[in-house]
Structure formats: structure tokens, C-alpha cells
Amino acid sequence: MNIYIGNLNYRVKESDLQQVMEEYGTVESVKIVKDRETGKSKGFGFVEILGDEQGKQAIAELNGSEFEGRTMVVKEARPRS
């Protein structure tokens, strides 16, 4: 399951996000979106986690929770159109 995670603190690294998500299941990939010109985080990213049940549990428990001083928005990622 591909999960969107928004409203991240700009200091959060992909390794930090992976650590949080590994509590819910096997993480296949973590990608924090960065500005092309500056290389700075845009404050959101995507995590691919194995298994829909694990993904749904992560969404249910993490959406609205605080991480690094910001309230995260966590939901299933929509496919690119």
C-alpha cells in the first residue's frame, strides 16, 4: 500500500520516517519530496508498506498524531493521473 504523509517537519529525514513506519510492517520504500532547485524538503512524502492491513493500521494510528512538532496528515496515496 502506498501511503501519503503530509505536514512533515522540514527537518524530518527519510530514515526517520522509515523508523516510524516499520512499527506497522515491512517498509518497501520511503520518499520525501524535495524542491528541485534547493534540495529542501517540501514537507510531505510517500511510504510504500507491504500489506493493506498494516497500511490501514498505520493510517488509523498516525493520522493526526504529532511527529517532530507537527501534526501529520496520513492517508492512502491516490494514484498519479
Image (cartoon, grey):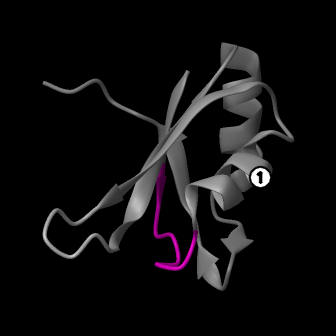
* Label 1 CA crowd tier, 10 Å (few <14, some 14–19, many 20+): few
Residue at (82%, 35%) from the top-left corner? 24
* Image: magenta residue range: 5-12
In this view, which residue lies farthest toward the right? 23
In the visual, does 42 lie left or right of 45? left
Q: Is residue 15 above or below residue 35?
A: above
Residue at (13%, 70%) from the top-left corner? 37
Prevalent SS, magenta region: loop
Secondary element at tag 1: helix
Q: Residue 4: percent from the left, percent from the top?
A: 46, 44
> Front-most of 6 and 14?
14
Dividing the picture into quarters, in which one does residue 65 lie?
bottom right
Q: Residue 2: percent from the left, percent from the top?
A: 49, 27
Dividing the picture into quarters, in which one does residue 69 lie?
bottom right
Dividing the picture into quarters, in which one does residue 52 lie?
top right
Q: In the rendered structure, does residue 61 fall within the stretch colored magenta?
A: no
Residue at (86%, 41%) from the top-left corner? 23
In this view, which residue lies farthest toward the top? 51
Q: Residue 19: percent from the left, percent from the top?
A: 78, 51
Q: In the rendered structure, does residue 8 fall within the stretch colored magenta?
A: yes
Please give the residue where the numbered disc 1 appears in the rendered image.
Answer: 20
Q: Is residue 6 above or below residue 2?
A: below
Q: Residue 76: percent from the left, percent from the top?
A: 49, 33
Kind of residue at disc 1: Val
In the visual, does 77 lie left or right of 56? left
